[in-house]
Amino acid sequence: MENIALLAGYGRKNITPDQPVHIAGGNWRGRVSEGVLDPLYATCIALKMGEATFLLYTLDLKVTTKNITNPARAYISKVTGVPEENVLLSATHTHSSVATRYTWDGVEEYKNFFYEACAEAAKEAIGDLQASDLFVGSTQTEGLTFVRHYLMNDGTVSGSAFGDTSSGYKRHMRPSDGELQLVSLRRDGKKDILLLSFPCHGTFQGNAKVLSADWVGPARAHIEANSDTLVAIFQGASGDQTPGSRIPDLAIKDYNLHGQKLGDYAMAALSGLKKITPTQLQQKRRNIIFPVNKKNMDKLPIAKEVMELIAKYGPTSQEVKEKMAGSGLASRYEANWLITRSREGDETDLEPAILHLGSMAFVLAPYEMFSEQGKYIKEHCPLEQAFIVTCFDGSFNYIASKECFDYDCYESQCCFFARGTAEELADIYVDMMQE
């Protein structure tokens, strides 16, 4: 039987607001945009084999929560005719994008603009469909991403926002995953399409009041300016990884240089990619029930008292400081997340998914997967490649690995899922690819 060709198309639309907006990441209430450092985009990759068409998006947003993905998916489907379940949305996880998860004046207006832009990107990608050869591979980078949990000189651990760092930083808790994954869709008569997955938070801008795609923006621009290629960048398993390090002289401090260096790694790797023949285009999903994270739930009563004082006097008030001093809480963030997690009950669900092309698959992971699980999936993948896409399908927050439940860190405190979920989920993805 004759092989059915894989068709691929590319569409991209600007989703940068033209009015001040609240910025996601950090103190969103206090971060109202005062300018644009670089544009935000909705990038759509259309993939078609036979009767099956999928739209795979990477969006310059911090998260893709249900309040924006569900109406976006419905609107895109209505405009294009592609089934809603075949519209796949993920975020690049820039912490300098629009705070779409929250309610503020103007957010609904922005969402409507966003839905329209996503639909236009899809129409452009579908109109751009062309028979494509598929090439996959990866390359290792140096000095571009770091695990953000540290061992201190006194033997204690500093995890993200928690921990005493007065004794000084000794080393990172474990080596980072610096693998850059590549998928190249090569088309006769049209520009090639390059998909990249890299596990690194988009946090260069900190609490600055400017909109930015963070390192993704200059990486994308650098490759497109220096090659005849259209680029889509996806977030890898970066739940515990950032572009910065507290240990001196390890990290690139400028987001432009970081993006350009990543782009150079990508372009250098293109000639070494392996051609594979896709045999199908199929989505697989499972719905799994997991236990809820009950870490430190015995502190819930004092957490409620702390949050009541914060609401009354403010987070830096003397009243809050005195209550925190005797509370046993690592920070006011822990107090907030204890209350949030307490509302989840005893169980919650996850829907792991893969988009399968025969000898490679896109691993579509909700929430922020840790680098350990990303590496595990890639190392145990029975296919040529498991291309990691996280911050997918209406999710926010972390799926923390077992190790960080042993000490206080931001990720284990706000993670909705109990210890062991991350490892079980990684095994589920491997099993789905083995089927």
Image (cartoon, rainbow, N blue to C red):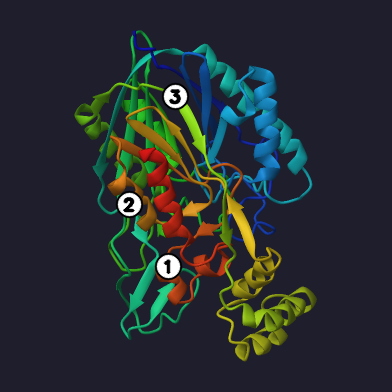
Residue 199 in the image, given as x and y percentages of width and height: 39, 49
Q: Secondary structure at mark 3?
A: loop
Q: Is residue 411 above or below residue 158?
A: above
Question: Which residue appears at 64% of the width and 75% of the height?
Answer: 335
Question: Which residue appears at 77% of the width and 42% of the height?
Answer: 106
Question: Which is nearer the eye, 412 or 263?
Answer: 412
Q: CA distance from mark 3 to mark 1?
A: 34 Å
Q: Is residue 200 visible?
A: no
Q: Is residue 309 above or below residue 274?
A: below
Q: Earlier in the sequence, mark 3 or mark 1?
A: 3
Q: Quarter holding the N terminus?
A: top left
Residue 22 in the image, given as x and y percentages of width and height: 68, 50
Q: Secondary structure at mark 2?
A: helix
Q: CA distance from mark 3 to mark 2?
A: 24 Å
Label ID, residue 281 = 3
Q: Are marks 1 and 2 in contact (CB under 8 Å)?
A: no
Determine which residue is flagged by label 2. 375
Amino acid type at mark 3: Leu
Disc 2 crowd rating (10 Å Cα; few below 14, some 14-19, many 20+) is some
Q: Are marks 3 and 1 in contact (CB under 8 Å)?
A: no
Amino acid type at mark 1: Lys
Residue 35 in the image, given as x and y percentages of width and height: 60, 44
Q: Earlier in the sequence, mark 1 or mark 2?
A: 2
Rendered image quadrant of residue 148: bottom left
Q: Is residue 96 visible?
A: yes
